[in-house]
Image: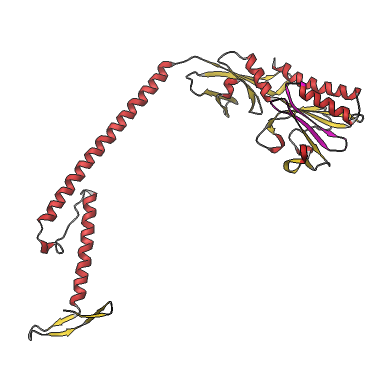
Amino acid sequence: ELKGYFDKVEREGGALLDNFELFSGGGTIDLIIKQRVEKADFVSAIGWIANDGRFFYYMKHEDGGLDYYYQNAQGGRLFMRDNIPVIPGNYIPEIRQWYRLTDNKASTWSELYECFGLSERQCLTFTLRVNNEKAGIQIIKIDVNLNHLGNYLQEISNPGEVIFISNNNQVISGNDNSKHSYIRQDEKNSRFNVLISGKDNTYDGGSISVPGYPQFHVNLYKAMGQNPWLSDSIFLWGVLSGGLVFGAIYLYSNCTLKNTRRDIKDFVSQLIALPRASYFSHKFDIVPGENKDVAEIKKVISSIQNEHNVCSENLLAMVSFDTNSGFFSSIKTIEVNNKCYLAA
């Protein structure tokens, strides 16, 4: 069935060549191509290179409308209606993915590529050589309507199946199930792995090349059945594991908080019991394994004690006292905020 789909695209190219033989003139050729784009639902666009090297293109919208693209000079800017540039730079057909016709080939199929180098739209193209001086065309390209191809695959697939077309390990188009699936290329065995979000089905299948079109592969995956027990078990184990982890965290946090409160309470009681005069002389030793909050408080107190002792020694160094006479033998003046004070 899929061979017939690609045959239909190639027959469209042959029909265009036949029309070019029967009719001539730039206006007539342009009208023929425009009508074929409008009527052929499996075609999204048709482009052609004229004998003078300029490129022209008719593209169909989902609503059936057409956009017309054209060049004013060979290899120049590509414009659409009202002289709006399609891409920032020049458009050179010979370097595009669809232009891969060697001298000894009459036609070829492209891989999936970004149309005009823009990510908004993907193209799959059948290109054929015209060699018709009367028609004034060198090469013509036919872009496949990928949405129409996807709808066709949806029609021929059975419920629950995942079917899609690939080329060079790249998914081109597929049915509705494929659009809601996670499809990943398995590099080990050159096949795809399929997973549908929200379903417990396991999918198995494979791919075969389309007869007459070895570059294209049809991939068919079927649901092998559901395993609700496995799904329910995974959910149940997830809930139980989450509950156990939460309970363990709660018990640990509760025990740690109680121990911290008890250690701090004991330390505060120790501070209250100290005589006032001992605050700056009492040594607070840090015990190994002690609560870290209590240890930090002890470090702060020790730092304050050291600063107090340094200040006391500096003040005492300013005054000399003669114990024999009972008089101060040296008194220094301290200036603070433009005021003088005697150290005593």
Residue 29 versus residue 127: which sits nearer the camera? 29
Residue 312 visible, this angle: yes
- Which residue is farthest front? 82
Residue 126 versus residue 88: which sits nearer the camera? 88
**Residue at x-position 18% and y-position 79%:** 343
**Residue at x-position 84% and y-position 27%:** 31
**Residue at x-position 59% and y-position 20%:** 176
Q: Position of residue 278 (x, y in %)?
A: 12, 62
Name the quadrant containing residue 51.
Answer: top right
Which contiguous range is marked in magenta?
39-65
What is the count of numbered marks? Answer: 0
Residue 80 visible, this angle: no
Q: Is residue 249 left or right of residue 229?
A: left
Name the quadrant containing residue 4.
Answer: top right
Q: Is residue 18 left or right of residue 94?
A: right
Q: Is residue 51 magenta?
A: yes
Q: Position of residue 101 (x, y in %)?
A: 80, 32
* Above-or-below relation of 133 to 155: below
* Above-or-below relation of 96 to 299: above
Q: Is residue 274 magenta?
A: no
Q: Position of residue 90 (x, y in %)?
A: 76, 43
**Residue at x-position 16% and y-position 60%:** 283
